[in-house]
Image (cartoon, rainbow, N blue to C red):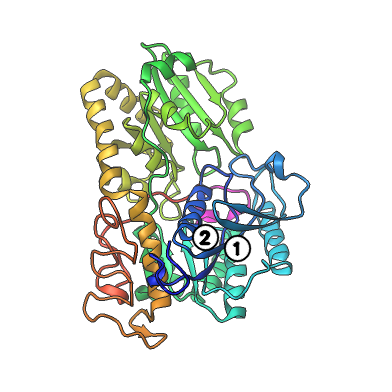
């Protein structure tokens, strides 16, 4: 890792003190939590003093983890990272009012009790937590250090598109808060280029936006599919359609209930949790060929995905440019074909096309989804070819090393001296296609850069430090 005298491998050759603000963090194993955890632990492994300001673990069940129930504040060490947790409300069912109370409690407690730490070199925030973004921006201003939010979901667009009760009224308010947060950033990271237009509309100059793709954070399956299917009670002749992840409003999982109802021979499995789990259970009470499974253990998760015949990703027709499901990279790694019941033109559809690992069908259309599944079941060769494209896509574009290198590049751009072509600390940029000291040159990565496959297809932001666009999109936003 190097020493404090400047021989550390990451962060431009010197140790830094960093604060990541992310409401979601380990032990949460889906959504934003795994990404926030891997980023923070990566920085710690490079020798940086890394702190995280987080909430109490609650996602995707929207119920506080039993190990943290009753805790008001807690500071713990995880993977070399100091995690400062603050209690907040956890609404079991999402409405605009309940979401506002959730955000308000996060904001009030974290501002009242910020982490006890020395002044950091930079503050990074994982959005969509509006409160976390405000807290991070305020702390960065107090310390007079760069603030870098990474947008995983857009809450203003989510309120308008996800179907949450009272969402229309909440959308404008959420967008105003997002604008407040993002305009105070030195740079803004977005996980997919389809977010760029909305972020620009919030008042962020395009040259300050960087695409920071997420990555596949699960291992490849290692056991025979047949073994897992026997254990789960799935017969060899069953056609199993599996949806894994959050059961929320924006997923529109009613389409899978409808498909199961249309074909009693189809086996539909919903694995996970979320605030719509009970409502879906009531809707599917008369559908015997649909079953619910609890979230799989981390070690078993890749095996369960690989045991299915088809992996389903679904979204309401209104969801376009506010989220890219976090399940996609896991699906691709599992090596099974994906059927995406999503709006064409959105980030999710674009990622399925890029991967070559799935087929698209119109959203909220059970008959269309069923027809696609039947087509794959009738042509195992085509299904296997689609499935095989997923791991290739992961290896080429979605490696953890590549994703983490992009975070390193983002930090080095703000800390090395050049942001959007403006020198901050007297360190000149590298000219055309250049970058700040240790930063991301065209096609390159930060100090300690990208292993296998480079920093995604397209490498660093096109056009150097001021380009603001990646040549390739990011994949998979966290689910909300």
Residue under label 1, please give it. Answer: 132
Whole-percent x, y for residue 349 in the image: 33, 45
Left or right, 389 with respect to 15, comes to left
Q: Nearer the viewer, residue 50 or 424?
A: 50
Mark 2 crowdedness (10 Å alpha carbons): few <14, some 14-19, many ≥20? many
Height in image: 162 above or below 178? above
Per the model, the C-alpha gap separating discs 1 and 2 is 8 Å
How many numbered tags mark residues here? 2
Q: Earlier in the sequence, mark 1 or mark 2?
A: 2
Q: Nearer the viewer, residue 296 or 261?
A: 296
Q: Residue at x 39, y 68 (%)?
A: 410
Q: Residue at x 27, y 57 (%)?
A: 472
Quadrant in the rendering for residue 190: bottom left
Residue 113 colored magenta? no
Height in image: 98 above or below 2? above
Whole-percent x, y for residue 286 in the image: 57, 17
Q: Are marks 1 and 2 in contact (CB under 8 Å)?
A: yes
Whole-percent x, y for residue 79 in the image: 54, 51
Mark seen at residue 410: none
Left or right, 29 with respect to 428, comes to right
Left or right, 233 with respect to 461, comes to right
Height in image: 157 above or below 66? below
Q: Is residue 217 visible?
A: yes
Q: Secondary structure at mark 1?
A: helix
Residue under label 2, please give it. Answer: 126
Quadrant in the rendering for residue 375: top left
Specify start and end residues of the magenta stretch as a single range.
154-167
Q: Secondary structure at mark 2?
A: strand
């Amino acid at each position: 890792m190097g020493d404090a005298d400047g021989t550390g491998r990451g962060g431009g050759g010197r140790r830094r003190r960093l604060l990541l603000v992310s409401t979601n963090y380990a032990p949460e194993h889906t959504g934003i939590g795994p990404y926030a955890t891997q980023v923070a632990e990566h920085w710690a492994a490079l020798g940086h003093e890394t702190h995280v300001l987080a909430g109490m673990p609650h996602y995707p069940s929207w119920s506080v983890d039993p190990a943290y129930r009753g805790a008001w504040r807690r500071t713990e060490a995880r993977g070399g990272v100091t995690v400062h947790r603050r209690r907040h409300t956890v609404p079991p069912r999402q409405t605009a009012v309940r979401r506002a109370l959730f955000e308000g409690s996060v904001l009030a407690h974290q501002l009242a009790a910020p982490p006890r730490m020395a002044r950091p070199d930079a503050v990074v925030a994982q959005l969509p937590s509006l409160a976390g973004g405000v807290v991070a921006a305020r702390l960065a201003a107090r310390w007079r250090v760069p603030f870098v939010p990474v947008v995983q979901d857009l809450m203003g667009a989510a309120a308008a598109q996800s179907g949450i009760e009272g969402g229309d009224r909440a959308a404008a308010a959420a967008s105003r808060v997002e604008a407040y947060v993002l305009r105070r950033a030195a740079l803004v990271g977005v996980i997919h280029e389809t977010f760029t237009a909305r972020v620009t509309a919030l008042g962020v100059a395009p040259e300050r936006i960087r695409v920071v793709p997420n990555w596949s954070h699960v291992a490849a399956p290692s056991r025979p599919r047949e073994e897992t299917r026997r254990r789960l009670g799935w017969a060899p002749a069953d056609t199993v359609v599996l949806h894994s992840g959050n059961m929320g409003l924006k997923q529109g999982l009613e389409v899978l209930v409808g498909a199961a109802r249309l074909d009693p021979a189809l086996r539909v499995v919903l694995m996970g949790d979320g605030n719509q789990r009970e409502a879906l259970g009531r809707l599917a009470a008369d559908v015997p060929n649909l079953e619910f499974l609890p979230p799989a253990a981390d070690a078993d998760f890749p095996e369960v995905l690989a045991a299915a015949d088809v992996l389903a990703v679904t979204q309401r027709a209104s969801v376009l440019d506010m989220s890219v499901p976090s399940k996609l990279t896991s699906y691709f790694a599992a090596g099974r074909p994906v059927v995406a019941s999503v709006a064409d033109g959105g980030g999710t559809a674009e990622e399925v096309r890029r991967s070559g690992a799935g087929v698209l069908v119109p959203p909220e259309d059970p008959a269309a989804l069923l027809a696609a599944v039947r087509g794959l079941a009738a042509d195992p060769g085509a299904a296997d070819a689609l499935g095989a494209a997923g791991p290739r896509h992961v290896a080429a574009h979605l490696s953890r090393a590549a994703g983490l290198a992009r975070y390193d590049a983002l930090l080095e751009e703000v800390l090395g001296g050049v942001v959007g072509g403006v020198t901050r600390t007297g360190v000149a940029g590298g000219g055309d296609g250049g970058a700040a000291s240790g930063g991301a040159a065209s096609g390159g990565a930060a100090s300690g850069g990208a292993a296998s496959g480079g920093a995604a297809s397209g490498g660093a932001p096109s056009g150097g430090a001021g380009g603001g666009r990646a040549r390739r999109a990011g994949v998979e936003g966290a689910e909300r």
